Image (tube, rainbow, N blue to C red):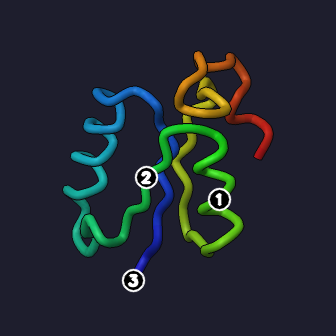
């Protein structure tokens, strides 16, 4: 089974990405891990292996902060 990490802080964009991914044969909700900020994404990248990561470049370091223009480029 393919494992996907989606890093997106905006709800509407995350929803659109999820709809697109779930329309692909063989991809289920269980295949996808979601992160809403850089810290959460780093946690998942340290603890699991992913075949694909979809990364929003402008994300906050933590969910209580505003997005940084290059917040996702530290990966």
Q: Give above or below for 28 relative to 74.
A: below
Disc 3: which residue? 1
Q: Quadrant of residue 58?
A: top right
On screen, residue 50 versus residue 31, left or right, reads: right
Which of disc 3 and disc 1 is earlier in sequence? 3
Residue at 60% across, 21% down: 65
- Callout in the foreground (2, 1): 1
Residue 1 lies left or right of residue 50; in this view the side is left
Instruction: Say which residue label 2 marks.
Output: 34
Task: Give the farthest residue toward the front.
Answer: 64
Q: Residues within 10 Å of mark 3 (few under 14, many from 20)?
A: few
Q: Nearer the viewer, residue 41 or 27?
A: 41
Image quadrant in which you'd find residue 38: top right
Q: Residue furthest bottom?
A: 1
| Disc 1 and disc 3 in contact, CB within 8 angstroms | no
Instruction: Tell whether 74 sits left or right of 27.
Output: right
- Rendered location of residue 11, percent (x, y): 32, 30
Q: Position of residue 49 (x, y in %)?
A: 62, 74
Q: Residue at x 65, y 72 (%)?
A: 47
Residue 75 is situated, as x and y percent measured from the top left of the image, at 76, 47
In 3D space, how far apart are the residues under numbered discs 1 and 3 (Cα atoms)?
A: 21 Å
* Residue 20 x, y percent position in the rendering: 26, 47
Q: Dot 1 corresponds to which residue?
A: 43
Going from the N terminus, do you reach mark 2 or mark 1 first? Answer: 2
Q: Is residue 62 left or right of residue 18?
A: right
What is the distance, in whole Å, between disc 2 and disc 3 at their CAs? 17 Å
Q: Quadrant of the N terminus?
A: bottom left
Disc 2 crowd rating (10 Å Cα; few below 14, some 14-19, many 20+) is some
């Amino acid at each position: 089974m393919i494992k996907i990490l989606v890093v997106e802080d905006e709800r509407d964009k995350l929803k659109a990405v999820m709809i697109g991914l779930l329309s692909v044969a063989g991809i289920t909700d269980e295949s996808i891990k979601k992160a809403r900020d850089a810290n959460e994404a780093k946690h998942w990248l340290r603890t699991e292996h992913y075949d694909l990561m979809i990364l929003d470049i402008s994300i906050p370091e933590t969910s209580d902060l505003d997005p940084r223009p290059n917040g996702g480029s530290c990966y």
